[in-house]
Amino acid sequence: MNERSLRVLEFNKVKEKLKKYAHSSVAKKKIDELEPFDNVYEINNNLNESNEALEVLMKKGTPPLEGLFDVNESLERAKKGGTLTPEQLLKVGGMLRATRKMKEFFKREEQEEAYERLEDLAYILAPVTDLENEIEKAIVSEEEISDKASTTLYNIRRSLKEKNSSVREKITSIVKSNAKYLQDSLYTMRGDRYVIPVKAEYKSAVPGLVHDQSSTGATFFIEPMSLVNLNNEIKELMLKEKAEIDRILTALSLKVKDHSDECESNFKVLIQFDFIFAKGKYACTLNAIKPNVREDGIFNIILGRHPLIEADKVIPSDIYLGEEFNTLMITGPNTGGKTVTLKTVGLLHIMALSGLLIPAKDNSSISFFKEVFADIGDEQSIEQSLSTFSSHLTNIVRIIENADDKSLILFDELGAGTDPAEGAALAVSILETLRNRGAKLIATTHYSELKAYALKTQGVENASVEFDINTLKPTYRLLIGVPGKSNAFEISRRLGLNDEVIKSAKEYMSNENLQFEDLIRELQEKSIIAKKEARDAKLIRSEAEELKRSYEQKLAKLDQTRDKVYMEARSEAKEIVANAKDEADEILKAMRELEKLGISTGGRQRLEEERKKLKDSLEEREKKLHRIKEDNGELIEKVTLGMEAFLPSLNQTVVIISMPDSKGEVQVEAGIMKISVKLKDLRKTKQTKAEKVKKKREVKLNLSNVESRIDLRGLDAEEACYRVDKYLDDAYMSNLGEVTIVHGKGTGVLRKAINDMLKRHPHVKNYRLGGYGEGGDGATIAELK
């Protein structure tokens, strides 16, 4: 990609914003080097990585990359046998801690959503827990080693504290006894040794070693002779402490060297994670999406927004090219948004081709272009004696030399800066030359000749930026298919220009031009109305489809649950009967063995009675599984197709879908199943609508063991929404009036997901955040219908 276009389209500013979301300087350097990829595979791979990062941030929260610093220099030093400083070891330890936490972060249960690319990357991470723990145990800060680093260091420091305590007691006593010779009644330190400030005239009165003198010469800092030995001992302990610290640092540095390969590999993976999640965080702030990448030169950006304009000020626009036309001519007043439109198209393409998600609506697509050329802005040069026209033309020459069918070309004010007639003719010629090569073009202009050129040329389409005559302000909305109108007369009238002057000006224009301008205005107004109605219709349709999809999913869940319960009940019943039969067979076997041992006739008769009793018991137990109770209803005498009937064995109402066959069996439909049953096993349904409602109410009352509170803390948004949906169904069936949904405070992602679901849930009447004593912002109270 040519550097000029990247600069003109301000891709560097996007990268500066992106760098704010990276932790390490290495990842920031990687962002600085980011540029569009030259093949579709890498583009899609990087877009998918960015999209996975965005989904992880939304569903699992921020990854544990805190404490990640550049450790390349430290690892190189350790590999060469050098001793690392506490600061360097601390950074290595932070990197190892991030390695372990990232590995744990991407562990998931079977039912959790998979993030293939990021999980594959996390799989490469190899935690070095022993080294991490040793560094954490030994290093307290960038300048301090912990007492726990070794037993020797602990003992040295304990002795040092005791010696310092003894010295302070002794020197305090010396200060008191020699107070009249001292400048101040206190002691101080000189070169790690305790000294007292003695007045110059009493220097000989206090025996000791002189260590320093004040700038005025009035005070000598003397170490009393009685403290010399104690100070020496402290100095020796301090030297031992330094030697032990050096030994500890050397030992830790050696272990870093032993694990340098794992550390380097982990660091590279963490930098890649830092880079990917920086893209995800930036996409989150832009409310960006992953576009489809096409290779046929067609793109359709839906409600695209310029990423460098503030979210509350940017105006989204639909911009498409390549399907019905390959060249777009944008006209309209100055400051109307023409240049912003050009920059939006170019910058969104460069972002997507670099693997960044773009601020647009779902289902937007961009096209793979090997080059994006942009001739935007006034780059006249005094040093090179180039006028505005000359600088534009120099750039256009370079574009013509390099453009092909894999190029997107953006022209701002094509042909401007010279005679209008010649400029317009030159502009048409340039456009035709590039169109013949198959390049995709978007150009802005003020020339009416180019509007006419677009109207009569196949593959070229007019567009304009909307202008509100009432407020005299542009709306910055792009209207494709409608050429722009200058609005000079209307603007002049609004600004107070005399009507006579305006009328005279119109006389200098031909009737054809006036009619053409009026036609443009009429088309513009109709286009605005049509587009608004189309947007509203699309929104309503989208909501209806979402509602339909939601109910279909719930219906499928209900059917699946019902079938599962039925099959489990049948399986359990069969198991009970089978176990009972096995038990009976064992008893009968034992009876036969008793007979063989020679039991008398009376005994045999008794055994037969027991056997019959057991057999009757088994038969009765089997009948209970399929028994038709008398109070279940009357037998069906006359069968009609489609009639409802009650099947006691399933405890369910079924629909008869066939007439009785020769065996007296009919086919019935129970939910999604079709089964054959005997007609005599069916009963008439007696329930009226009122009774059905009552029965539903009874079912609701029978489920009253459902709790009025559900705790979702620790779950991701998708799993939490699934559980709440099921819980609300149970709560509604249990006739609960109000329930508490505990989601915690955290980042607010889980609360937002729950509240979005509650807005459209059919069982929820209204909802609110918890008050004092109800969980506050960490809970939502939902009132059920």
Image: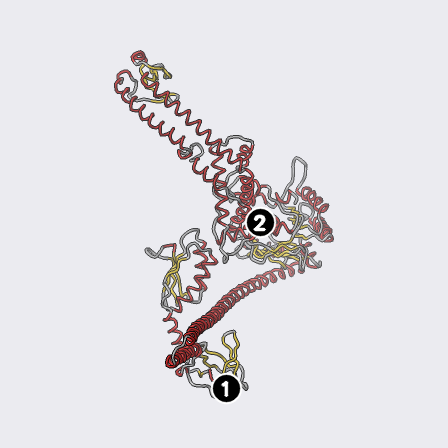
Q: Secondary structure at mark 2?
A: loop
> Which of the 4 image quarters holds residue 785?
bottom left
Across and down, in percent, residue 124 comes to 55, 46
Name the amino acid type tagged 2: Leu
Q: Residues within 10 Å of mark 1 (few under 14, many from 20)?
A: some
Spot occupied by residue 671 in the image (x, y as percentages of width and height): 50, 74
Label 2: how many residues lie within 10 Å, few (<14), some (14-19) or many (20+)?
Answer: many
Picture quarter with the N terminus: top right
Q: Residue at x 30, y 14 (%)?
A: 206
At label 1, the amino acid type is: Val
Q: Judge whether 642 appears above or below 747 on screen.
A: below
Left or right, 436 with reference to 635: right
Residue 632 in view here: yes
The answer to whether residue 373 is left or right of residue 268 is right
Instruction: Give the farthest residue toward the front.
Output: 598
Q: Is residue 113 above or below residue 90?
A: below
Q: Which residue is mark 1?
A: 639
| Of pointers 2 and 1, the one earlier in the residue sequence | 2
Q: Nearer the viewer, residue 89 or 499?
A: 89
**Residue extending furthest bottom?**
637
Per the model, the C-alpha gap separating discs 2 and 1 is 67 Å
Q: Where's residue 310, x and y in %?
A: 51, 49
Give the label on residue 440, or none: none
In terms of secondary structure, where does tag 1 sit? Answer: loop
Whether residue 500 is visible here, answered yes or no, is no
Q: Which residue is mark 2?
A: 356
